[in-house]
Amino acid sequence: MDGWNKLQSSISGLNLGQSANKLAKGFNSSVQATKERLGHVAPEEITELPQEYKDLEARVDALRQAHLALLKITKAYENESYDYPTQIQESITELSTTIGHGITNFAATNLKGTNLPAPSPVAPQLAQHKTLPHALCRAATNAAAAMQRTPGGNEDKLGKALSVYAEVFDNIATARIQQDDSIQKQYLYPWQTTLSTSINVAMKARQAVRVSRLELDAAKQTLKSTSPTKQEQARLDVENAEDDLVQKTEVAITLMKTVLENPEPLKNLNELAKAQLLYYAAAAEALSSAQGEIEELSVAAEGEYRKSRDH
């Protein structure tokens, strides 16, 4: 009898309480797992699980990987600046403004009644959305305003085109926020919930099967190596372990089937696609109208330019 088996046999043979028995089984299954990993157990001595169970395992693994793969990318929708990295610099500027606003208002409140001049309280700067459509709207608005402030600016075609462009991206920016909100509520939250609840429960049930299978094979090893006086108890331990494995396998099969039959992931994916469709359709419609107007201004400007060059 090798060292592993001697230790297993001595622990299994002790007259222990329930918690100690559990500890002994846990040790035996850990030993069994180590021996299997090191290749010290012949393949025929490892209990074969039902093919149905193994097929379901593969399908649940694929479902879990699908959730993880898409989630890794779509979690971007939790942060509205996913398409506008320049916002980091804007945030630093806003932070400085916010700190300045706080200091000014603190001074306005606390210098009252003193000989020091107290500044007038100022309104806080409104928080800006950090998306590319919002940034384009702000940039085009500022550019149009700058051109319109110049002499004859109200007649400038580029200034008019910039105003049209700004208005379009104001509408697109609103649609973009609506898209992100819908994706977070109708797709991201339930998608992550499926991953952390039903799929996770099925994975835990599979782990219970693995532990039960290791305990059974450890009990079989003990039965093979135990002394004649302890054969009956060892045989009983094998029977109990077999019953436990059958029960755990049935539970895991039921839970895995439940996860795989759940229509929720398809519903969630549909909500993701629908929110994106509504956003891109709104953006396309707004841009289509604006682009036609900007093109007219462009053609008119080009005509005026050619006419002036001809003279």
Image (cartoon, rainbow, N blue to C red):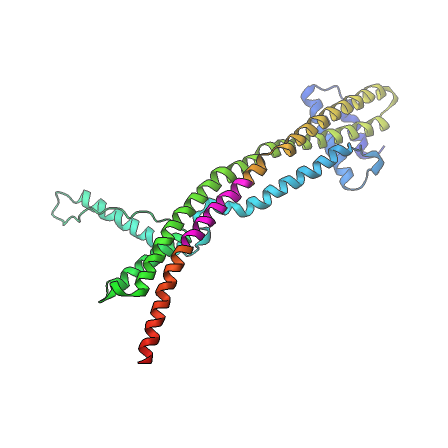
Viewer-proximal residue among 165 and 105: 165
Q: Is residue 78 above or below residue 307?
A: above
Looking at the image, can residue 90 be seen?
A: no
Looking at the image, can residue 72 be seen?
A: yes
Q: Is residue 4 above or below residue 308?
A: above
- Tally of numbered discs: 0
Query: Residue 159: where, in percent of width, then height?
Result: 30, 63
Query: Residue 38: where, in percent of width, then height?
Result: 78, 42
Q: Residue furthest bottom?
A: 311
Residue 59 horizontal side relative to residue 192, left or right: right
For the point 41% across and 45% down, the residue is 177
Residue 59 horizontal side relative to residue 154, left or right: right
Query: Residue 226: where, in percent of width, then height?
Result: 84, 25
Residue stretch in magenta: 270-287
> Which quadrant of the rendered structure holds the N terminus?
top right
Residue 68 horizontal side relative to residue 305, left or right: right
For the point 39% across and 47% down, the residue is 174
Query: Residue 119: where, in percent of width, then height?
Result: 17, 49
Residue 43 counted in the magenta span = no
Q: Is residue 171 above or below residue 26?
A: below
Q: Quadrant of residue 149?
A: bottom left
Q: Main secondary structure of the magenta part?
A: helix
Q: Quadrant of residue 222?
A: top right
For the point 59% across and 41% down, the residue is 67
> Which quadrant of the rendered structure holds the C terminus?
bottom left
Q: Is residue 28 above or below residue 280?
A: above
Residue 272 counted in the magenta span = yes
Viewer-proximal residue among 199 and 311: 311
